[in-house]
């Protein structure tokens, strides 16, 4: 019985596919760790250091961070109930928001690089968005409203901006501006300055 011969081209193709697959996995892991590092530094470390500089107990700062992650803008009520200064609450919650937004973008970019299906989808979206230059150019401004909506909130607004391929810096700016506005409004409600009609 003749020995099976493997064609050199196929062997090389398998090796290069294995190397490409391995490098994709390594790059995905690297980007995942980068997202965690960004979230940790911006959303946790900076607020804790700020709290230490202002003599705010670390436990209260960490409680506000966790509340922000879970309750999003509604964490303003938690911050005030912890006896924290409203400006400090707004600043910490904004740092948490920026850290999470940057981390989500990093994860989505890594996911797009790993998945051919997502790559095709984002390319298709980019092509469709080119048909609407006004939406492509100014669409990110609509993200100012999304953090205020109960169903969409912060996390979904980032994903929407990314999926529609809007400019990253503009999207981060408008999501953050919307976040500051809704958090500031809720702080005013919690302080009794603004009466909410429900």
Image (cartoon, grey):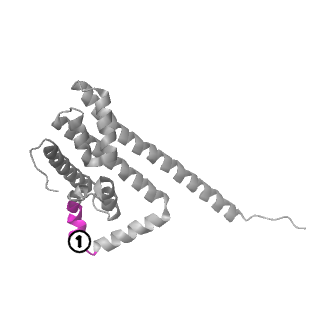
Return the residue found at the far front.
198
> Which quadrant: the C terminus?
bottom left
In magenta segment, residue 71 = no
What residue appears at the point 34 percent right and 72 percent down from the top-left corner?
A: 127
Residue 24 versus residue 150: which sits nearer the camera? 150
Label 1 packing within 10 angstroms: few (<14), some (14-19), many (20+): few
Which residue appears at 41% of the width and 42% of the height? 36
Does the image show residue 1? yes
The correct choice, above or below, for 139 with respect to 69 in the image is below
- Compared across the picture, whether 123 is left or right of 130 comes to right
In front here: 182 or 115?
182
Q: Residue furthest right?
A: 1
Which of the 4 image quarters holds residue 78? top left
> From this viewpoint, is residue 42 visible?
no
Q: Position of residue 123 (x, y in %)?
A: 39, 68
The reply, left or right, for residue 65 in relation to residue 8 is left
| In this rendering, position of residue 150 left or right of residue 85 | right
Q: Residue at x 34, y 68 (%)?
A: 126
User: For the N terminus, which image quadrant?
Assistant: bottom right
Residue 167: image location, x then y, percent? 27, 59
Residue bearing mark 1: 133
Q: Secondary structure at mark 1?
A: helix
Give the main secondary structure of the magenta stretch: helix
Q: Position of residue 37 (x, y in %)?
A: 40, 39
The stretch drawn in magenta includes residue 135: yes
Number of labels in the image equals 1
Which residue is located at x 26 percent, y 43 percent? 75
Where is 128 relative to 84, above or below? below
Residue 144 in which image quadrant: bottom left
Of 153 and 100, nearer the camera is 153
Stretch of the chain drawn in magenta: 131-142
């Amino acid at each position: 019985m003749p020995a099976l011969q493997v064609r050199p081209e196929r062997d090389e193709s398998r090796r290069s596919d294995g190397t490409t697959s391995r490098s994709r996995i390594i790059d995905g892991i690297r980007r995942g760790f980068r997202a965690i590092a960004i979230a940790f530094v911006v959303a946790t470390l900076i607020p804790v250091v700020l709290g230490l500089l202002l003599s705010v107990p670390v436990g209260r700062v960490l409680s506000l961070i966790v509340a922000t992650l879970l309750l999003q803008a509604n964490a303003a009520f938690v911050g005030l109930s912890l006896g924290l200064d409203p400006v400090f609450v707004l600043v910490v919650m904004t740092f948490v928001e920026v850290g999470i937004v940057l981390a989500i973008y990093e994860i989505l970019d890594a996911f797009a690089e790993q998945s051919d299906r997502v790559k095709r989808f984002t390319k298709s979206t980019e092509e469709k968005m080119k048909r609407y230059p006004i939406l492509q150019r100014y669409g990110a401004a609509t993200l100012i409203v999304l953090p205020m909506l109960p169903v969409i909130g912060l996390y979904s607004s980032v994903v929407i901006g990314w999926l529609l391929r809007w400019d990253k810096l503009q999207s981060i700016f408008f999501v953050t501006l919307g976040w500051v506005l809704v958090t500031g409004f809720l702080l005013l409600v919690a302080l009794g300055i603004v009466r909410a009609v429900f």
